[in-house]
Image (cartoon, helix red, strand yellow):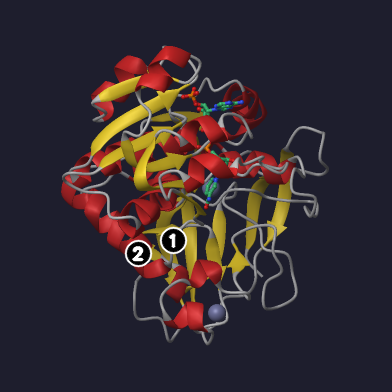
């Protein structure tokens, strides 16, 4: 079995630390990937801290993986050694259900997550805070030559999670899109929506990120605590992507939608969100959710980013800085995605 060095969480409260990992022996459809960079998603924090209640340890997080193909199984046709590839949040699905047939593998009841799930061989899947991964070729994506691997890594989750609802709800010229929370997901949402031609507004908790938002392509910037500005913006958006992982402000945000507008919940909120019926009824507004994106759409998003030169704004960290990075993310201090450089992995 191939060995990998990794960083893992061993329980919900201790810092992450080095962990020697065995990957499965590659089968005929498998791709062995030498991981170069892995983005740090807020979901990694939810899982390491067991926010959702089903984490199993040791747990190696990381589902924004960018690397180079080291070897391929005998039946692999979609990539070859030396190719630049990515792996996102999924590493397998049932292949037969309605969702899989419609290229919506993320909604497959048998979907296997890149970490925190049980793989076909009965072992836990482990993510990209590691030097090597073995993945079925159907779940390996091609990173366009125009994109650097480090800046492209966050596209594998933050990129597709915002791209998919923007496409589903028709963002483009003539649509007004608001992005709530300028973090990892939010900053990708701004860049993608602006590239699609939408008029973009960022709704943030403070004025600190205004210049960045405008540089990324936003036309307007709203501070959620500014009641007068929020009231003045009532009814002015067709689509809101809410990336915040806290239950605050939901009814206030719904009131910002125009008639028939939709707010899509992307942030994982542990507790129930209290929703008032009246702002939905008056305006035929909708509240929706969306989970990452399917494989075909993820490749489409990567190609779109390649054509438009879109990457994530990143801060590269060495592997041993991961616990510090988590603390800074929890304070919304990262501008705008930490990316781990796997060449700095200590050998376990
Ligand atoms: P992140 O980088 O930490 O960004 C979250 C942003 O939300 C912060 O930068 C901050 O923006 C804002 N924020 C944080 N705490 C807040 C609070 N208490 N009230 C209001 N705003 C707050 O996180 P991320 O990686 O973008 O992930 C965001 C959420 O999406 C997480 O819950 C993650 O698990 C989830 N997620 C969901 C999917 C999906 O498929 N649906 C996929 C990936 C991630 P400002 O500084 O601008 O206020
Ligand atoms: Zn993620
Ligand atoms: Zn399926």
* Marks 1 and 2 in Cβ contact (< 8 Å): yes
Depth order, front residue of 5/303: 303
- Badge 2 marks a residue whose secondary structure is helix
Tag 2 residue? 297
- Badge 1 marks a residue whose secondary structure is loop
Residue depicted at x 52% and y 87%: 96
- The x, y position of residue 1, in whole percent, is 66, 70
- The x, y position of residue 232, in whole percent, is 35, 20
Q: Is the residue 68 above or below the residue 47 in the image?
A: below
The quarter of the picture where the C terminus appears is top right
Please count the marks in the image: 2
Q: Which mark is residue 254?
A: none
Q: Is the residue 289 above or below the residue 97 in the image?
A: above
Q: Which mark is residue 293?
A: 1
Depth order, front residue of 55/71: 55
- The x, y position of residue 11, in whole percent, is 83, 43
Residue depicted at x 65% and y 47%: 6
Q: What crowding class fits label 1: few (fewer than 14 Cα within 10 Å), some (14-19), or many (20 or more)?
A: many
Q: Is the residue 20 above or below the residue 190 in the image?
A: below
Q: Quick check: 339 left or right of 9?
A: left
Q: State whether residue 258 appears in this view.
A: yes
């Amino acid at each position: 079995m191939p060995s990998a060095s990794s960083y893992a969480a061993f329980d919900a409260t201790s810092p992450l630390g080095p962990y020697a990992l065995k990957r499965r022996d590659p089968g005929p459809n498998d791709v062995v990937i030498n991981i170069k960079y892995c983005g740090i998603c807020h979901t990694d924090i939810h899982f390491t801290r067991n926010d959702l209640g089903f984490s199993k340890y040791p747990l190696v997080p990381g589902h924004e993986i960018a690397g180079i193909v080291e070897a391929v199984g005998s039946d692999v046709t979609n990539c070859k050694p030396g190719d630049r590839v990515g792996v996102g949040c999924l590493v397998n699905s049932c292949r037969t259900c309605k969702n899989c047939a419609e290229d919506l593998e993320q909604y497959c009841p048998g979907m296997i997550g890149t970490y925190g799930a049980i793989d076909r061989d009965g072992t836990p899947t482990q993510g990209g805070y590691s030097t090597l991964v073995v993945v079925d070729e159907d779940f390996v994506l091609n990173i366009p030559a125009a994109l650097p691997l480090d800046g492209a890594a966050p596209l594998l989750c933050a990129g597709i999670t915002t791209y998919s609802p923007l496409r589903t709800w028709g963002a483009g010229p003539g649509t007004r899109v608001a992005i709530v929370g300028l973090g990892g997901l939010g900053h990708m949402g701004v860049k993608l929506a602006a590239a699609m031609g939408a008029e973009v507004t960022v709704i943030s908790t403070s004025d600190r990120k205004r210049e960045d938002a405008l540089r990324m392509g936003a036309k307007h910037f709203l501070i959620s605590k500014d009641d007068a500005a929020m009231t003045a913006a009532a009814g002015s958006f067709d689509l809101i992507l809410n990336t915040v992982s806290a239950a605050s402000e939901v009814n206030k945000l719904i009131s910002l939608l125009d008639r028939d507008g939709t707010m899509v919940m992307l942030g994982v909120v542990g507790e129930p969100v209290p929703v008032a019926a009246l702002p939905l009824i008056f305006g035929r507004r909708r509240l929706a959710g969306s989970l990452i994106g399917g494989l075909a759409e993820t490749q489409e998003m990567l190609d779109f980013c390649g054509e438009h030169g879109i990457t994530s704004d990143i801060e590269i960290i060495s592997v041993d800085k991961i616990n510090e990075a988590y603390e800074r993310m929890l304070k919304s201090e990262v501008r705008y995605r930490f990316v781990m450089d796997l060449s700095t992995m200590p050998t376990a």
